Image (cartoon, rainbow, N blue to C red):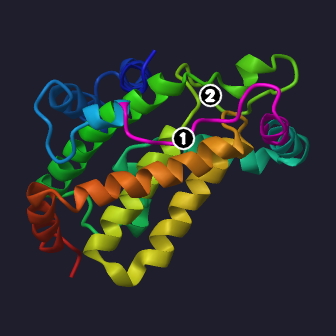
Amino acid sequence: MNFRKERVIVLFAALAVAGCSGPTASIVLRRLHLTSQRVYYVQAEQFKTVEFAPPPAPDSDAQKADLAAVLDWQARRTAADCARANVTAVADYEYFLGAKSPFPSPLPAEVKKTFDRLGADLDGAVTNMKERYRRSRVYKTYPGRAEPCVKKSWGYSYPSGHTIFSRVFANVLTDIIPARRDEFFATADGIASDRLIGGVHYPTDLAAGKVFADRFHAELLKSEAYLKDIEKLKACLVR
């Protein structure tokens, strides 16, 4: 299952529980509409073939080190660690900074539109990368040894989609407010780490996600549509 389908199914499940109301419902409806539309900023097709380092080979020393890191966190994580990792598992912008968002609450329509477009492009790009490598999740490769404390993901593991989304958000927000760069990237790094702590990703999944996110952002900066939308978002900031 690709990353886009996985995210839609998860959101539909939440939508059913929520009784088709609240922020989750609006996220589902916007994302379903946008993913069926044209590319907005970055073509996803290029990520089917772009040069990118593969994950560690099975039974390699790097793979063994990856597993050791997962099991080390599994042995020492706390209930609070797992609770936080469950909270940070939502990859949509509305949940990225929460009350620290530089935009008003509720989000202005222009902000929602831009981040939904960004998310639609990212879904396709991440799906293409995951399908290239098809690395199984750690708990699937090592059943009985690796036990997640967060909701299991159905898709492939490499690179980490949550790491990609959060770091792209950090890059985008830095384009808008450079002075808060350290804060934005610290938040993104925390979300990435929670995927390891929660037991659903290897360290190399996170490292690859960060590399990919920065490459994706470099492509964003080549898009006139993106640069124009960034200028629009600057006018939406809390004054």
The span shown in magenta is 49-66
Q: Is residue 142 left or right of residue 228?
A: right
Residue 22 seen from this side: no
Q: Is residue 131 left or right of residue 221?
A: right
> In which image quadrant can residue 156 be found?
top right
User: Could you tell me which residue is drawn at 25 percent across and 39 percent down?
Assistant: 121
**Residue 28: percent from the left, percent from the top?**
28, 29
Per the picture, the main secondary structure of the magenta-coloured stretch is loop
- Identify which amino acid the numbered label 1 is placed on: Ala
* Circles 1 and 2 in contact, beta carbons < 8 Å: yes
Instruction: Tell me which numbered mark, 1 or 2, is placed earlier along the sequence.
Output: 1
> In which image quadrant can residue 44 be found?
top left
Q: Name the disc covering residue 89, or none.
A: 1
- Residue assigned mark 2: 151
Q: Is residue 60 magenta?
A: yes
Q: Is residue 150 left or right of residue 171?
A: right
